[in-house]
Amino acid sequence: MTRIDDTFARLKAEGKKAFVAYVMAGDPDYETSLRIVKGLPGAGVDIIELGMPFTDPMADGPTIQLAGQRALDGGQTLQKTLDMARALRAEDDSTPIVMMGYYNPIYSRGVGRFLKDAKEAGIDGLIVVDLPPEEDDELCIPAQAAGLNFIRLATPTTDDKRLPTVMQNTSGFVYYVSITGITGAAEAQASDVGPEVTRLKAATDLPVIVGFGIRTPDAAEAIAGVADGCVVGSAIVSEIASGKPVDEILSFVASLAEGAHRA
């Protein structure tokens, strides 16, 4: 059982849906980013997705692309992202941390070294958007052997023929991308998402969490209401980009968490 498994078991027992928050590590700078990350559990975040900045984030829209560039310009590295996770873990031993990003920085570090360091830093799972199931031997299977969940994305274009392949080595939860396209591109609609979640849940016993296109507490409530929870990324990253004080950013996060927890 990982912290992710424990969290979903606890939420189920409480009759609550999960609220997952994404932030880009090192945005706008290391110290501010660390303060935000450390404040997320207190704002009601059940699972933290910690973005690994990368120069060519092909699945991300302008908001998260710019966040990654700000982080890189500020000197953020994969090591500093691991350090950030370790710093949170020193204060919080229960909130799951999922590292989300692209394979290139992991490959450059070396898979074995990365998995060892990630586990030691207190990372619980990985979302690596550019590694398809056909490449599971690269990272997915070694990650799970190291005790990390490997979380897969399913999308509106993942048809019934493809779905079993996508689910094959997935663990922790399934991340359903509610819209076709890049992050922050459109608004998710519960009426569209609900039937897709039902289809996914027929193919897996894992929780299904919905992300992309959720910007308000009401939207978080609506989407969480048809799934096991929701993820908000671009809307939070936009608040960070605006230069608002950390307490205002965390207040916004708390409003989203409250919405999801109302579902």
Image (tube, rainbow, N blue to C red):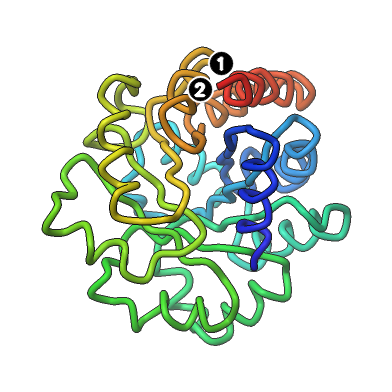
Q: Residues within 10 Å of mark 1 (few under 14, many from 20)?
A: many
Kindly identify the residue that appears in the image at 62 percent across and 64 percent down: 124
**Does residue 95 appear left or right of residue 145 in this picture?**
right
The amino acid marked with disc number 2 is Ala
- The quarter of the displayed image where residue 121 is located: bottom right
Place of residue 50 in the rendered image (x, y in percent of width and height, measured from the top left): 59, 50
| The N terminus: image quadrant | bottom right
Which of these two is toward me, 19 or 139?
A: 19
Outermost residue toward the bottom?
112
The single residue placed furthest to the right in the displayed view is: 91
- Label 2: which residue? 220
- Front residue (pair 49, 146): 146
In the picture of the structure, the residue carrying the numbered disc 1 is 217
* Residue 42, label in figure: none
CB contact under 8 Å: marks 2 and 1: yes
- Element type at mark 2: helix
